[in-house]
Amino acid sequence: MPPGKGQGMSDTSFAIELKGISKAFGPVQANKDINIAVPKGTIHGIIGENGAGKSTLMSILYGFYKADSGQIFISGKPTPIPDSQSAIRAGIGMVFQHFKLVQNFTVLENIILGAEEGAMLNTSLARARKTLKQLADDYELDVDPDALIEDLSVGHQQRVEILKALYRQADILILDEPTGVLTPAEADHLFRILKGLKEQGKTIILITHKLREIMESTDNVSVMRRGTMVATVKTAETSPEALAELMVGRKVLLEVEKGPATPGETVLKLEDLRIRDEHGVERLKGISLEIRAGEILGIAGVAGNGQSELLAALGGMMRATGRATLKGAALPLSGAGSDGQSRRRAGIAHVPEDRQHYGLILDFAAWENIAFGYHNDPDYQKNALIMDNAALKADTARKMETYDVRPPIPALAAKNFSGGNQQKIVVAREFEQDPVLLLVGQPTRGVDIGAIEFIHKQIIALRDKGVAVLLVSVELDEIMSLSDRIAVMFDGQIMGYRDPATTNERELGLLMAGITDQKGEAA
């Protein structure tokens, strides 16, 4: 028998081995007899469609769920992991797709949470402050240690999660969709960090839907489909097309196919749009733009430069000043008629950037979430006082089938769907309303390759039906492939417009950084 192997033992060259892992949630089999081995000192990718079971598998490894059957080995030794504290003691750290942060705690308090030293917190806080500064300096992950989490942007909250894992000095680091909220430059920097950690002997498990990240950063990649492990291959010996086909079980179109736009009348016109936040800081500084029927205007920019506020004002979630018209009629920016319900009645559909906070009520069922904002639709009413729940559930089942929401259970609470399937629920609700204007924020954040293809096709189909589309995305390739025109925002202003057919990522990146020449063109 080979050294290091035997009854209850495994290969010590592997940081992690999972053998025969199965997990079911009621009738849903999330993981089925999963086997995976991750060599020490490597970056190992795990990919699969939404609902394939990736996050469930890693949650078992981190002690959030208990497997129904199977064993976990760490460095060749059987290691029960009943809870996250056990995982941390075993040298495992995890950065979740949806952050596990206490919103009314400071950055520093979140960093030490669960890693306090004794009853008095002063020692822990002082040590954490010093270590946090060192980590921030080493990895350029600057964040104010005394800021409240609820006051931070999504991107800075992601930094806190990464810092929290690094602070605990894990030998095995699991990252679940870590770049979903990062700019391309921030993502590139993150992968430099991960490669540095690998060189120090750390083992990285990367869950991502982005095949470019897999191809550029991993040593090996495992592919999951519908709860099973279908393949593990060396990254250097595969291709994006082959991985996509393994994930979905069919050939996938990796490039967006669309014909030229045929813009019609002006649908949305903004003049001198301005927003001040609760601290009096001007977030939008005189935005003027037009979107015509049958075209997609993409907004490119680093997170925090006013794109979120622009969507919020147009979606009825934030008050603004200036002038706005929708198909020639005044669109109120404050006061009566400026709320979300009024926007929907006017024909504006809105896919918000943060699905969990603004797109869904997580404890409510999928069929209830499908009704939000549209519960007064005559198709959902038995009479003026009673909703037709049976009709709504049937409509939800139809939309789940059309948008391939998994599992297709209308009664299942939104919190029990994977992040990508939560996104599909929001997209299905908004896209199916025959809007005049579609506001889309980060449409494919945390969504798998097959669903990205589908969502992109639906956006193009709406454009071709004459819908005006305002698209905000931190993914430059998404902006460039979907948009008919691109507006670049920096510091609450539009720096310029570009034709996606003639621009490039460098030119857009310079504008996103606020760099222009004297003529206002990209330097």
Image (cartoon, grey):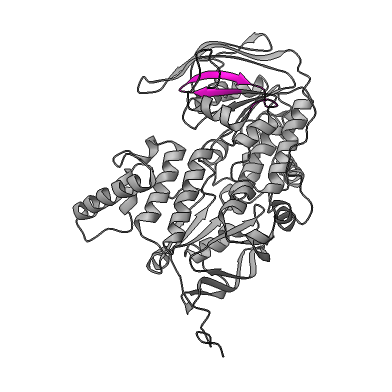
98 over 433 or under it: above or below: below
Q: Residue at (66%, 37%) from the top-left corner?
A: 427
Residue 32: image quadrant is bottom right
Q: Residue at (66%, 31%) from the top-left corner?
A: 480
* Side of 74 relative to 328 (left or right): left
Is 495 within the magenta?
A: yes
Residue 500, image x, y percentages: 67, 27
Tell me the magenta residue range.
Answer: 487-503
Residue 151, image x, y percentages: 38, 35
Q: Residue at (51%, 44%) from the top-left corner?
A: 188
Is 390 within the magenta?
A: no
One can see residue 101 in this view:
no
Residue 522: image quadrant is top right
Residue 29, image x, y percentages: 66, 64
One can see residue 125 in this view:
yes
Q: Nearer the viewer, residue 40 or 89?
A: 40
Residue 501, image x, y percentages: 70, 26
Quarter containing the N terminus: bottom right
Q: Nearer the viewer, residue 274 or 496?
A: 496
114 over 374 or under it: above or below: below
